[in-house]
Amino acid sequence: MSLLDALPTPRIRWEGQHPNVVLISLSLVMLCAFWTVDVVSLAPNRIVMGTGYGALEAFGWPGVVLITLLLSSIGLFACQPTLPHYRALLTVVVGLMALMPVGLIASGLLLIDPELPQARLGIGTAYWVVLFVLMLCLVEIRLRLNLTRLWPTLLLTGVALVWWLCAALWLDNLALVQEFRARDRQFLTAVGQHIRLVSIAVGVSVVLGLLLAMLMRRYARLQKGAFTLLNFLQTIPSLALFGLLLAPLAWLAAKVPFLAQLGVSGIGTTPALIALIAYSLLPMVRNTYIALEEVSPDTLEAAKGMGMRAGQRFWQVRLPLALPVLLEGVRITTVQAIGLTAVAALIGAGGLGTFIFQGLGQAAMDMVLLGALPILIMALVVDAGLGALAEALRPGGH
Amino acid sequence: MIELSHVSKRFDTEIAVDDISLRVPKGKFCALVGTSGCGKSTTLRMINRLIEHSGGEIILDGQAIEAYDPVKLRRRIGYVIQHTGLFPHWRVARNIGLVPRLLKWPAAEVQARVEELMGLLGLPVGEFGHKYPHQLSGGQAQRVGVARALAADPDILLMDEPFGALDPITREKLQDELAKLQARMQKTVLFVTHDMDEALKLADHLVVMRDGRIVQQGTPLALLQHPADPFVESLLGGLERGLKQAALTRVRDHMTSMGPTLPAQSRIPADFSLRQALSMMLRDHSDRLTVVDQHDVPIGELTLRRIIKEAQFDRGSSRE
C-alpha cells in the first residue's frame, strides 16, 4: 500500500471536475474479471483439482445483478467525482469488501451437494482480482478525500473482522478454513515462530544498525567498506545464504560444545537468524545513517552554540529529528524480513513458510495460501502501522 | 568585555584568520564587516569555541577562553545564526527556554523568562508559544532566535548575519528593534554582517576584514571620513559615502537659531538625520528647513549652505 501512497497527492479541485479515469478503469477491470473468470472452484476432496464456476453459477441471477450494479456504480460515481460521490464510493468499496465472504457463503449453498459434505470450496481468480482492485480503489479514494492513513486502516480492520466471523461461523466448506481446522495448533505455533524470528532479527538489526551507523559517522573510512560489504550480502540469493551458512555453523557447533549448547547448529533457528540479520542490516544501516546525516547542520550548530553537550545534542536533537526516516528503515526492514522468514522454513526454522513448502510439496494450493495469506496480512499491517507512526513523528507534526 | 589579541586560525595549509586584534568594551556594539570568506564568521565562532583558535589570545571578562569549559562558556554567551537554527521539533516556547533549562533553572522561572522575552520581541505568548518553527515567517523565526539567545540573560551576544536571509523590509524592522533593545540592555555585542548599511546603522565600532586580516577599524563616522584604502571605500559605497555620512548625523547638531526671515514651510524633527533633511529639501525644492522638537514647536532652522559647508560632519556627532 505504501508504494501507492508514495504517489503525489493530487490537489483537490471540486469545481469543474474531470471524470476520475483511474476509478472508471478499475471498475471496468473488476466487471470484466467478474463476468469472465472463475469466481469459485469446487473439489470433491483435497487431492482432486477443483472445477471452476463462473459468476452466474456461483451466485445465481439475483447475486450477479446486485454485484454488477455495485461494480458499475463505482464507474458511474467516478464520472462525476464530487465530494459526496467520493464518500459514496468509499461506502460502496468497503461494502463490497465486506460482502465478499457473504458471496462465498451463498455460492456454497448453491453449489455444494448436501450429500457430499467433504466438498471443498476454493476462492477463484475473479475473487482475488476484485479484492486487489478494490484495495487500489481504496487508495485512490483515500488520496482524493485527503484522509490520513488511519481511516483506511480502521475500515480494513472492520472488513477483516467480517471475513473472520463468516469464516468461523458459516464457511466450513471453504478449503482455506478446512486447511486451518486440520492444523490450527500448528498454524498458531507457526505464526508465533514467524513473529518471533522477525522480531529478533529486526530488533537485533535496529541495535546493530544504530551502532554501525554511529561508528560510520565517527570513522569516515569505515563507511565505504561497511556499505560495500552490506551491499554484497544483499546480492546473495536468500536460498544460497541459508545454504552457505549450513556448513560453517555445523562445523562450529561440532568444534565448540558451548556454542552447540547455546543452540547453534547447521540448520534451525540460528542460521536463519544470522541470515535474516545479514539481510536486514543494509536497509537498516543505510536509513539510519542517512537519517542521522540529514539533520540540518544549522540546527546542530545552534544546539552546540547554545551549550548542549554531545549527549544532549544526540538524544534531544539529532535522534528525534532523524526518527521519521529511521522508522522508514525499520518499516522496510521488517516488511522484507517478514517475507524472507518464509524461506527460512527450508532450513528448519519453522514459521509460516512451513505451510508454503509443505503445500507446494503436496500440490495443495490451499495449504500454500494458509501460509502465504498471513504473511501478506502481517506485511500490510506492519507497513501501515509503522508508516502511520513515522508520519505522526514528523518534526512539528508536518 | 571581549578582547582578541593577535588571533589567528589555520585550517591545514590555509590561513583563515591572520593576526587580528580587536576589543569590544562592555556594553558596546561591534560589527565585523567584509565580503564572504573573509574570516569574519570564523572569528566569531572562535569566541564561543565552536572553532578553536590556533594562535594569539582571546580574553573574555579578563580570562582567556581556554580557561572556561566550552559548554559552560557557550551557555553564558548568546548566539544567533543566519538560518535561526531553531529546533523544528520543539514549539517556540520550548526553543526559547533552551539555555535556562540547560542551566537547570526552576521550571516556573524558565516559563516566566520565556513570557517576558516573547513580550519584549513582540511575539504574544498566546499566539506564538505553541507554534512550531515551520509555522512562523522568516522575521518571526529570527525574533525567536534572538529571544533564545537572550534567554539566560548573557552579557555577551554573538550574532552571525542574523538578518541576512530576510527580505529588506523585515530586515530593516528587525534592525530597528535590535537597536532599541541594545539601547535598553547594553549587551556586549559582536555582530557579523556583509551589509555595510546594517553595520553603519547598528554599530558603535566597525571592523572591516579582508582575506582574514583587519583592514581598518574605528567608529562608523571615522571610517566614512577617512577610509584606509579603496577596498574600504568601495565597501562604504564609493560615491554614496557622503549620503551615508549624512545619515549618521542628526539635524539637531547642525541647526542654527531662527533667522530674521519668515520660517520655511517644510518642517523636520530635530532627531532626524541630515540625509533625511537633504531628501526633504530635494522633494520640496527648498534650501531651508524649519527644525521642530517632538511637540512640533519650531526650535531652529537648517540651510543647505550650512550642510555643505560643514560637510566634514566632524563636530558634535551623536554617535561619538
Image (tube, coloured by chain):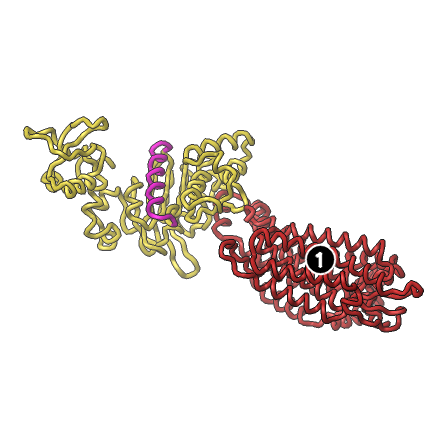
Q: Position of residue B261 (x, y in %)?
A: 6, 30
Residue drawn where x is 75% and y is 59% of the image: A100
Q: Position of residue A138 (x, y in %)?
A: 64, 57
Question: Which of the image's four quarters has the C terminus of chain B?
Answer: top left
Q: Position of residue A328 (x, y in %)?
A: 62, 57
Q: Colour of chain B?
A: yellow
Horizontal side of residue A47 vs B248, given as left or right: right
Q: Is residue B14 magenta?
A: no
Question: Which of the image's four quarters has the N terminus of chain B?
Answer: top left
Q: Position of residue A98 (x, y in %)?
A: 74, 55
Residue drawn where x is 42% and y is 40% of the image: B143
Horizontal side of residue B59 vs A219, given as left or right: left
Q: Which residue is mark 1?
A: A96
Magenta segment, which residues? B165-185
**Image height of B79 relative to A192, above or below:** above
Q: Which chain is red?
A: A
Q: Quadrant of the rendered structure where residue A93 is?
A: bottom right
Observer-nearest of A40 and A277: A40
Q: Can residue A323 be seen in the rendering of this structure? A: no
Horizontal side of residue B101 vs B282, given as left or right: right
Q: Can residue B182 be seen in the rendering of this structure? A: yes
Q: Chain of mark 1?
A: A
Horizontal side of residue A251 vs B233, given as left or right: right
Residue drawn where x is 21% and y is 36% of the image: B250
Secondary structure type for disc 1? helix
Observer-nearest of B279 and A159: A159
Q: Is residue B171 magenta?
A: yes
Q: Residue furthest right?
A: A115
Residue drawn where x is 73% and y is 65% of the image: A128
What is the three-letter code of the residue carrying label 1?
A: Leu
Q: Residue furthest left?
A: B260
